[in-house]
Image (cartoon, rainbow, N blue to C red):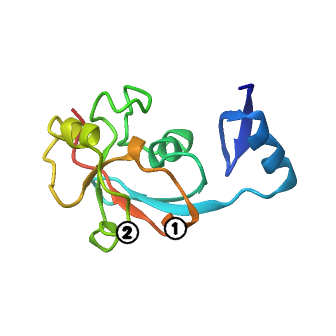
Amino acid sequence: MCLRLAKEAGAFYIAPVDRLKQISKGTTNVAKITYIEHGGKQHVVDVANGLTVMEGARDNNIPGIEADCGGACACSTCHVYVDPSWTDKLPAKEDMEEDMLDFAYEPDPARSRLTCQIKVTDALDGLVVQMPEKQI
């Protein structure tokens, strides 16, 4: 697959060539995601469908999501607490995510998620996530 640097929703990322065609035609969709820092500061950004919630934070320089492993589900530094109104609307956690959440800072069994494992779709428009006090 051929990849190229693309700019979408105000952020740069590596995109497959077929995605570049969608961008140039204006046929990609975005979801508005609200990231809330531990101190309460909110960042509302458009994240392109197909990216992860972690990539949306990274590409928009949202503090509090470190993503040390780059989205490989090999750390817990993209841990967030999902707003309670969204917990049942997200796809279920897979076993690997469950295992990695054991290493997160103060995980909440009901609300904790790794943002690298949440793929953005139209259905996530309005999603609200809050960062923990720290990432470990």
Q: Position of residue 107 (x, y in %)?
A: 16, 48
What residue is at 38 percent from the left and 25 percent from the top?
69
Amino acid type, label 1: Ala
Q: Which mark is residue 89?
A: 2
Q: Position of residue 77 (x, y in %)?
A: 30, 35
Decide if residue 127 is on the left or right side of residue 4.
left
Residue under pointer 1:
123
Q: Which mark is residue 22?
A: none
Question: Is 48 above or below relative to 123?
Answer: above
What residue is at 27 percent from the left and 53 percent from the top?
38
Query: Residue 19 versus residue 112: which sits nearer the camera?
Result: 19
Amino acid type, label 2: Lys
Question: Is 34 above or below relative to 55?
Answer: below
Label 1 with label 2: CB-CB less than 8 Å: yes
Decide if residue 44 is on the left or right side of residue 17.
left
Q: Position of residue 104 (x, y in %)?
A: 19, 39
